[in-house]
Amino acid sequence: MASMEAPCEANRLFALVEQLTQYSQWMPLAHRVVQAEAGPDGRPAWDVELRARVGPLARSKRLRMVRTVHDAERGTVTFERDERDGRQHSIWMLSATVVETGAGSRLDMHLHYGGALWTGGLMERVLADQIAAGRQQLLTVVANQA
């Protein structure tokens, strides 16, 4: 789980996390995000390429993510992996909650990965670095919108 405080209203911060296409503005891990065709259930979908550098090497992963929860009133959103190739895939789930605070708003995010590619101490450190950079960049985006 990662959290951050932002000096803005909750609805402004929620607008930056409710659509995955926004993530490439502020999250270095979200290398490329494009809107994909919605499934038969009509839920919005995105093709996402995650990329992180480990020294001279880069690891990347492509995912099709759908928004499974979207409650703007409560400030909650969840995205889950939903590939359309008929094969079994590792779970990827990203949830975010934005709440008002006395000084602005707070964002709590949780990323759950059920596979083995992105695990291990080194990748956890890389992910922590990506989260820290994303947190700072998100604050910059919020400040530039003011």
Image (cartoon, helix red, strand yellow):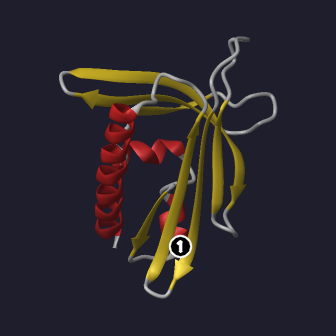
Q: At which x and y percent is residue 88?
A: 70, 15
Rendered position, 5 above or below 52: below
What residue is drawn where x is 29% and y is 66%? 144
Element on which disc 1 rests: helix
Q: Can residue 31 be seen in this view?
A: no
Direction from residue 104 to residue 85 in the image, left or right? right
Residue that badge 1 annotates: 10
Q: At which x and y percent is residue 108?
A: 53, 62
In the image, farthest residue toward the right? 41
In which quarter of the view is residue 84 placed?
top right
Judge by depth and name the residue closer to the eye, 114 or 141: 114
In which quarter of the view is residue 24 placed?
top left
The amino acid type, in three-letter code, at marker 1 is Ala
Direction from residue 115 to residue 4 in the image, left or right? left
In the image, farthest residue toward the bottom? 102
- Quadrant housing the C terminus: bottom left
Judge by depth and name the residue closer to the eye, 53 or 137: 53
In which quarter of the view is residue 136 placed?
bottom left
Rendered position, 69 above or below 142: above
What residue is drawn where x is 54% and y is 63%? 14
Judge by depth and name the residue closer to the eye, 123 or 143: 123
Rendered position, 41 above or below 129: above
Q: At which x and y percent is residue 52?
A: 32, 31
Q: At which x and y percent is residue 89?
A: 65, 19
What residue is drawn where x is 55% and y is 51%? 110
Judge by depth and name the residue closer to the eye, 28 or 125: 125
